[in-house]
Amino acid sequence: MKHPIETAAEQIRATAAEATETLNLGGAWPAGLPLETVILLTLVVIAVIAVTVVAGIPIVLVLMERKVSAYFQNRLGPTRVGPWGLLVTLADGIKLLFKEDMVPPSSDRKLFRLAPYVVFAASFAVVAVIPPFQSTVIGNMDLGLFLYLAISSLIVLGIIMAGWASNSKYSLFGALRAAAQIVSYEIPLGLAVLMIVMATGTLNMQHLVMDQADGIHAWYMFRHPFLFIGAFIYFLSAVAEVNRTPFDLPEAESEIVAGYHTEYSGIRFAYFFLAEYANAFIVSAICATLFMGGWAAPFPFLSGVPGVVWFLGKTMFLVFIMMWLRWTLPRVRVDQLMSLCWKYFLPISFVNILGAGVLALLEREEIGAQLGGMFLSAEAVSWIAFPFVLALLGWFARWGTEPVRRPS
């Protein structure tokens, strides 16, 4: 059986042969190219397009954040550079290109120069596993989810390199905070992803989206309550992992200036800046793919709209939620940040894993309940019981507690 990339390469070679023959450029030479050469050229072209598109996304997101923050604060935002201020982020990027590239004299120069590239490369490499539309090649990897978790973990290595190599206490504090924060929140994030794998039995993200293509009722976040809670845990853990407010402790300017990239300037600072917004887009894209149907339309009658439109719409909606949180909530303390992960998200994730496993077993054995002559699946029964369980937990949480009374 041929691999999908081989089939695509053969089609590209045949199309190129027809096109060159039509244009009187000699149709024999593309048809005579070895299949391995066509595959290599195809992968190079796909990689160049992906990097070009993803590199432009942070520029759009920076402008979007400025406009969103201005709306929340009753301001206009950028209006001067270009029509409606649309070119202001491009102007900022050009300015960073011409700024002096400072390297602290007491720093570890090799690690200092290498760190931005490690963060930048790890952020952009994850794009290879994301399926923006239905395809047998793009995002069609049997170990796509595994690669996402493995590659994204390299970002913390680059951040630690930047903090250590800078030879600055502010940078080192920021790097250690980032390491503790990212490693901690990767656990509930990974457990939320594991629930998807338990329910479907695949790590291929194209297959995950196809399994949700029947409509909004088929989205994993609406399959049963455990996945619904898991979607929120994944998103909030992702917000913490990419160091977005209110979880931006590694670069808290009121405490440690700018954190791990305090000593960076010019293009090297731009790499960190681009990677931060690229990470925000990527984790939102992964969340939309895993829990919100990815490129699939929410309703069957809207399936005529291109899948990439739905994918970008869902992803940008989640990015907007991140920006909404940033310009609404204050920054939390370090102890509050870690308590949220270890005391709340982690126990809830373990309960979610147990519940998702039980429901997956019941669904596999087709065990449910009869109600008025109608068979209800285990997932449907879990949705019926969900509000009653929440009410019971709320009652237990309130029972036995007394309001704090101030001394008279």
Image (cartoon, rainbow, N blue to C red):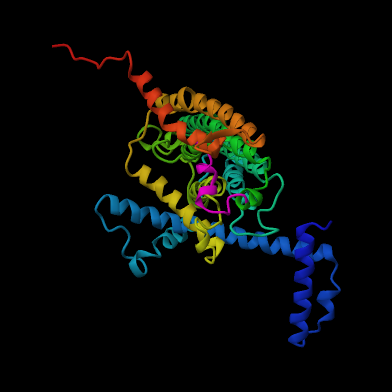
Q: Pick whichever, 381 or 270, lies toward us.
A: 381
Q: Is residue 333 above or below residue 377?
A: above
Confirm whether residue 230 shows in the render: no
Q: Residue 366, percent across and down?
A: 64, 36
Q: Is residue 78 above or below residue 146?
A: below
Write the residue at 54% across / 67% down. 304
Q: Residue 211, percent across and down?
A: 62, 49
Q: Pick whichever, 258 or 322, lies toward us.
A: 322
Q: Is residue 161 magenta?
A: no
Q: Is residue 130 above or below residue 106?
A: below
Write the residue at 33% across / 60% down. 78
Q: Residue 173, percent across and down?
A: 47, 29
Q: Is 281 displayed left or right of 64 in the figure?
A: right
Q: Quadrant of the N terminus?
A: bottom right
Q: Residue 358, percent across and down?
A: 60, 29
Q: Quadrant of the C terminus?
A: top left
Q: Quadrant of residue 335?
A: top left
Considering every residue shown, the one lying at the far front of the view is 373
Q: Quadrant of residue 165?
A: top right
Q: Is residue 214 magenta?
A: yes
Considering every residue shown, the one lying at the far bottom of the view is 24
Write the residue at 39% across / 47% down. 323
Q: Pick whichever, 73 or 290, lies toward us.
A: 290
Task: Tell me where the magenta segment starts and ends, as one range.
Answer: 211-225
